[in-house]
Amino acid sequence: MACPSDDDVSLVSLARLGDIAAFGRLCERHRASLLRIAWLEAGRADEVHDIVQDSFAAALTAIGALRE
């Protein structure tokens, strides 16, 4: 059973404060969905993984700017 702090809102709040483990849990949770979306857009395996990696890097960079 997941602990209460494992919901997305709590993980984002922790990640905003610099908790890299929380950001990692968010990435793990949403990676499959992002891979599917990237595949629909790119259609090439080599591009799909680059898109996903770039997306998570951009999210990590911007997460501190999110407001509650």
Image (spheres, rainbow, N blue to C red):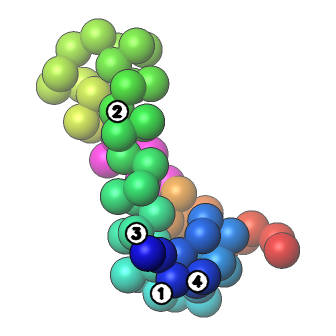
Residue for badge 1: 19
List x then y, in percent, for residue 35. Answer: 34, 33
Gap between marks 2 and 4 measured at Cα: 25 Å
Residue type, numbered disc 1: Asp
Q: Is residue 56 magenta?
A: yes
User: Looking at the figure, which quarter contains the C terminus?
Assistant: bottom right
Mark 3 is surrounded, within 10 Å at the Cα level, by few (under 14), some (14 to 19) or many (20 or more) other residues, namely some
The residue under the point 74% across, 68% down is 66
Answer whether labels 1 and 3 touch (C-beta < 8 Å). Answer: no
- The mark lying in front, picked from 1 and 3, is 3
- Residue 5 in view: yes
Extent of the magenta region: 51-58
Gap between marks 4 and 1 measured at Cα: 12 Å
- The mark lying in front, picked from 4 and 1, is 4
Task: List the single residue furthest toward the right.
Answer: 68
Residue for badge 4: 5
Residue type, numbered disc 4: Ser
At mark 2, the secondary structure is helix
> Where is residue 62, by image quadrant?
bottom right
The disc, 1 or 3, on the residue closer to the chain's N-terminal end is: 1
Residue for badge 3: 25
Answer whether labels 3 and 2 touch (C-beta < 8 Å). Answer: no
Residue for badge 2: 35
> Where is residue 67, by image quadrant?
bottom right
Gap between marks 1 and 3 measured at Cα: 10 Å
Nearer to me, 10 or 63: 10
At mark 3, the secondary structure is helix
The residue under the point 68% across, 70% down is 9
Task: List the single residue furthest toward the left.
Answer: 46
